[in-house]
Amino acid sequence: MTTTADRASAIVPAATSPYQRSVAEYWNHEENPVNLRLGEVDGFYHHHYGIGDVDWAALEGPEASRDERVTAELHRLESAQADLLADHLGAIGPDDRLLDSGCGRGGGSLVANRRFGCQVDGISISETQVAFANAQASKRGVDDKVRYHVKNMLDSGFATGSFRGIWNNESTMYVDLSLLFAEYRRLLARGGRYVTITGCYNDTYGLPSREVSTINAHYICDIHPRSAYFREMAKNRLVPISVVDLTAATIPYWELRATSPLATGIEEAFLNAYKNGSFQYLLIAADRV
């Protein structure tokens, strides 16, 4: 008997290369507790990391509820990251349209809709993620405004100039930036805003460090050098208006996560890379001119 999971893994129409098919396959089967358990706190399922000072009281109190407190604190930090990204989307009205590119299980789209009341389209090459996200939008009663699609962010098929804002939240490392920003130049209305939060390697150090290579292997991705973002944005009429180094702000999240039963084993590589300067966590906001 063919199950829903079998169909999701076998049919990936948005994945157009062997690499993309491998990424889609990975996310179609991914059920990492660090993504699922955190989302269960309030129904906003994110696929990214957190920022801000940790309330270390989460480690205190009754041992029986310690894991629950730590999970809630990790989710608070990832929610703060999602809110910070939304802060940088600019003046968005209820009649505007946004694109959550590489949407994961859809938490960021729901955050944006809750804040702005506007239409949000989320896209992923993972059918499993898209089905999960659409179910969450329906459950919240916002599926008339928030819709998720199995689409490739490099060739989305949406109409030219149809979006006021686009963002990537930790998903640019899966694609060629020259192709990605060419597509966003097409999709964004003049004066529209693009925002990304991403890990990038510090190319003043030369090639990627051992820790960055470990992260690449763990997530089947290819982390870009910092300079590539600004070079490819300049080629595609995306003018940075805000660049925020979030490296120091994300280290507490990783320190707390390392104490959690939800740790995946990659925490040491992130912490070492951030602390030795070979890896940075940046927010870049740019306007389409």
Image (tube, helix red, strand yellow):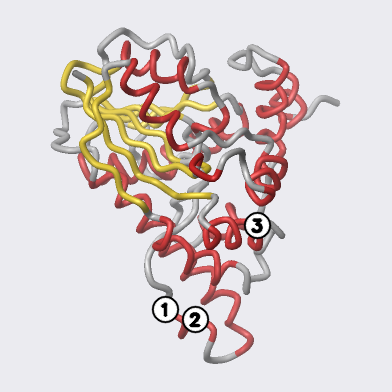
Would you call the spot at circle 2 few (<14 residues within 10 Å), some (14-19), or many (20 or more)?
some
Q: Which residue is mark 1?
A: 55
Marks 3/1 in contact by CB < 8 Å: the verdict is no
Query: Can I make out residue 178 in this image?
Result: yes
Secondary structure found at label 2: helix
Picture quadrant of residue 221: top right
Q: Secondary structure at mark 3?
A: helix
Q: Nearer the viewer, residue 63 or 255?
A: 255
Q: Quadrant of residue 197?
A: top left
51 relative to 174 in the view: left or right? left
The residue mark sitting in front, 3 or 1, is 3
Vertical relation: 200 (above or below) 37 = above
Question: Would you name the residue on which mark 2 appears?
Answer: 58
Nearer to the camera, 129 or 155: 155
Amino acid type indicated by mark 1: Asp
Label 2 or label 3, whichever lies nearer to me, is 3
Relative to residue 80, is residue 205 depicted above or below? above
Ranked by sequence position, the earlier of labels 2 and 3 is 2
Which residue bears the numbered disc 3? Answer: 269
Image quadrant for the C terminus?
Answer: top left
Task: Classify the position of the N terminus by image quarter.
Answer: top right
In percent of width and height, residue 171 lies at: 50, 35
SS at badge 1: loop
Mark 3–mark 1 Cα distance, whole angstroms, equals 23 Å
276, 111: nearer the viewer: 276
Q: Residue at x 33, y 46 (%)?
A: 111
Q: Residue furthest right?
A: 1
Disc 1 crowd, CA 10 A, few/some/many (<14, 14-19, 20+): some
Rendered location of residue 124, percent (x, y): 53, 27
Type of amino acid under label 3: Ala
Distance from the alpha carbon under mark 2 to that under mark 3: 24 Å
Going 41% across and 64% down the picture, which residue do you hit? 76
